Image (tube, helix red, strand yellow):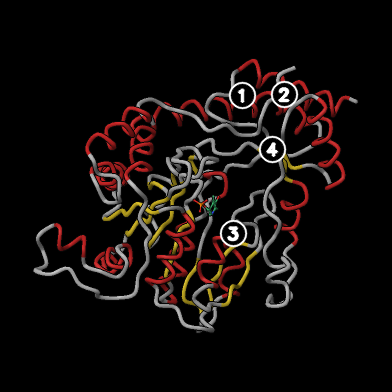
Amino acid sequence: MKPIPFNKPFLAGQELHYIQQAVAQGKLSGNGEFTQLCQRFFQQRYGIPKALLTTSATTALEMAALLLDLHPGDEVIMPSFTFTSTANAFVLRGARIVFADSYLDNPNLDISQLASLITPRTKAIVPVHYAGVACNMAPLLALAEEHGIWVIEDAAQAIEGYYLEKPLGAIGHLAAFSFHETKNVIAGEGGLLAINDERFAERAEILWEKGTNRAAFFRGEAARYQWIDIGSSFLPSELTAAYLWAQLEQITAIREQRLQQWNRYATALQSLAEAGHCALPAIPVYATHNGHIFYLICRDTNERQALIQHLAEHQILAVFHYQTLHNSPFYHNLHDGRQLPHARRFAECLLRLPLYFELSETDQQRVIAAVNSFYKA
Ligand SMILES: *Cc1c(COP(=O)(O)O)cnc(C)c1O
């Protein structure tokens, strides 16, 4: 029996051709033609005023934290059920993280708690669109506006997802996308900072280019190329951008393929949910998702472990996801002690099934049969 991996990096079309083209053009460092193509794609397709390609979503989030000019003691609200980078980017600037719980039936930040977490020191809220499923953005934005708080979307998983009519990543003041090989659109490692509030545009480009006005200089907008501000090397090489461009060209096919696979799981496993064996993802009415993750919620962590084991015996790799950050080894002493029971349940009971562009229908049927045989036993 052939093993079914959890994820598999893929070629969508012209990746190798474009990399060859970048080599032939003799331009491999960052901010060349392929970088421009990728950035324009985000600007045009999603109406993002300014997009900067980065080496990862992690560095895009780090740029966002730098742009906010955070000071030690400033508070940033985010869900506890998320990746470490969501928090680390702000911790690196000395911020205190105020972790919020998830909804009962959806891992995203529970908006009903948000008002009670806001203090005069709150500088930003970081909604994470888990599995490419939109957070409840209208009430979140309304609260943020009322209190003068920045909104930074962690849209790492959210390309081609929508909140009502708005593309995810085009809603907050800033947003971060990821092209890590586990995401829908990949470049090995890669990311993008969306600058939706034009007040950040000029400085973002300077931080991105190691604190210099290099980008403006090459556009002929500055007489000299100088050190202007703090910064770092946040931009990827043209090799990364060339790979990414080939993926972006196929974005509609990628989304449709993943949604078809996602829907196949949802339909086939519906009866298990109806019988009360496990829960399936709940998609809120305001969200149009992108098929990024298909998961089950097991009844408890032991049952999840047994299901992982059962699938492994069928040569299928299924994996759990985040451990909550509020009680992590790094942060538990800094957390304010609130229990976050819904986040904890997702940490303990959520199981992701294999889902990747090249997953065949036959292999998917094998996964479905194996999950069913676990609950029948
Ligand atoms: C993948 C991911 C990140 C980090 O992305 P990188 O590009 O690997 O740095 C951050 N946040 C979330 C929610 C993610 O899923």
Mark nearer the N terminus (4 vs 2): 4
Q: Is residue 365 left or right of residue 254?
A: right
Residue 309 place in picture, x, y as percent: 83, 35
Residue type for callout 3: Leu
Q: Give the quarter of the figure containing the N terminus.
A: top right
- Alpha-carbon neighbours of circle 3 within 10 Å: few (<14), some, or many (≥20)? many
Contact, CB < 8 Å: mark 4 with mark 2? no
Q: Amino acid at mark 2?
A: Ile
Mark 1 and mark 2: Cα distance apart in space: 9 Å
Residue to which mark 1 is pinned: 264
Dot 3 falls on a residue whose secondary structure is: loop
Nearest to the observer: residue 311 or residue 163: 311
Decide if residue 369 is on the left or right side of residue 258. right
Tag 4 residue = 280
SS at mark 1?
Answer: helix
| Eye-nearest disc, 4 or 2 | 2
- Of marks 2 and 3, the one in the foreground: 2
Q: Secondary structure at mark 2?
A: helix
**Along the polypeptide, which appears first: circle 2 or circle 3?**
3
Q: Mark 3 to mark 4: distance in Å?
A: 18 Å
- Identified by mark 1, the residue type is Arg
Indicate which disc, 3 or 4, sits on the residue closer to the N terminus.
Answer: 3
Nearer the camera: disc 1 or disc 2: 2
At x 57%, y 49%, the residue is: 130
Q: CA distance from mark 2 to mark 3?
A: 30 Å
- The disc, 1 or 3, on the residue closer to the chain's N-terminal end is 3
Q: Are marks 1 and 2 in contact (CB under 8 Å)?
A: yes
Q: Residue furthest right?
A: 377
